[in-house]
Amino acid sequence: GAAAYFTLARFGLAALLASPYTPGWRLWVDGLKENLGWVESTTIDNAVGMDGEEDATVASNSQANALKERESIALAWRYGAELGIYMFLGYAFQAIGLETTTASRSGFFLYLNVKFVPFFSYFIFGKPIQRNTWISALVAFSGTALLAFDNANGATGGAANGLGMAFTAGDLWSIAAAAVSALFILRMEAASKAVSKSSELNAANLWTVAVLSFLWTMGISWNNLIGSQGSGEVTTTVVQSLPVTFAHATQQTFQSAFSTITAHPIALIYLSGVTTALANFLQSKAQKDVSAERASVIYAMDPVYGAVFASKIGFFAHFMIVVIYYFGATYC
């Protein structure tokens, strides 16, 4: 349950950050301003007073631009919703898997997406895959496996906490998460090329994940409320009306999400703004020119990036502590 509320808080904040680029938002705002009389109409009425031929040209261009804008909005929502479903399922499957498997095993299985991308690309979408891509994917997967085995061997409790334990249902969920993650990368290539505005594709994607996360947490809150009957507490039960139960479930969902945000404000702001909204926008921008197969190999190197950043941040933090102690001892 905690993972679901954390996912809702993370993607809810990310969607709000990307909301100015929501497909159709600007068009709706402009239409609202015109209806309220805050701005002059930009429709065909503005052509009054012009020559007949010029009037027809302006009207035709206005209609063509409006139609093109609506098609662009529909395309952004179509691909954004599809990508959002893949992204949500990836997070949901991983969260479910972690209930019955270890983080090391889950991380290892999740990076099977590096191998799934060229596999799906070839067998599902019929794209020819170069030999170098297969080799690169295998090397990247091998490197991730070495990191996972190293983490497993160093874990407390030996093989029981690492990759040596028996295969579990959580492992299957983690593999399913890797599969939908590979589909996300593959479909991102087509979506980023079809949708001209990467910011709108990103916003539609994030809003889809946020809405699905809300429905997920609503289901958890509903089950918590129904399951609490008979516990002696005064709460909603199945005998109460559906609107009342729904209202209580909604209240619990928002309270839990808000509690998650207040408990980890800095971490969630960073995760939502940098590693979610910004990173997803950069991915949608980059995959206009980079194939999904090559991109998956690049993404597989994020343990290396993590190790580099961790070492640099650790060194910087240690350096700052030394500086503070030095000035404290000198001037205090």
Image: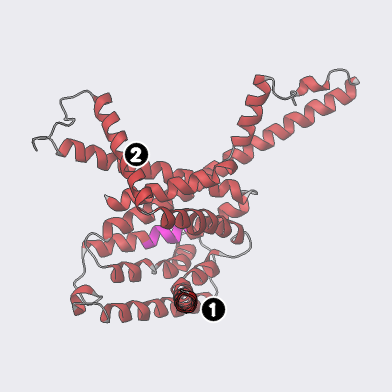
* Residue wearing tag 1: 132
Where's residue 209, x and y in %?
Answer: 43, 47
Q: Amino acid at mark 1?
A: Asn
Q: Disc count in the image?
A: 2
> In the figure, residue 74 lies in which quadrant?
top right
Left or right: where 119 falls relative to 93: right
**Label 2 residue SS:** helix
Residue positioned 39% across, 43% down in the render: 212
Q: Amino acid at mark 2?
A: Phe
- For the question of whether residue 296 can be seen, the reply is yes
Q: Nearer the viewer, residue 173 or 274?
A: 274
Mark 2 neighbour density, 10 Å: few (under 14) some (14–19) many (20 or more)? some
Question: Which of the two labelled residues, at mark 1 and mark 2, occupies the earlier sequence position?
Answer: 1
321 lies above or below 283: below
35 lies above or below 272: above
* Residue wearing tag 2: 254
Residue positioned 33% across, 53% down in the render: 92
Query: For the magenta stretch, what is the residue range?
Result: 178-184
Residue reaching furthest to the top? 49
Residue positioned 61% across, 48% down in the render: 195
**Label 1 residue SS:** helix
Select label 1 or label 2 by which is in front: 2
How has the structure been colored for display? secondary structure
180 falls in the magenta region = yes
- For the question of whether residue 189 can be seen, the reply is no
Q: Nearer the viewer, residue 325 or 163?
A: 325
Residue reaching furthest to the front? 332
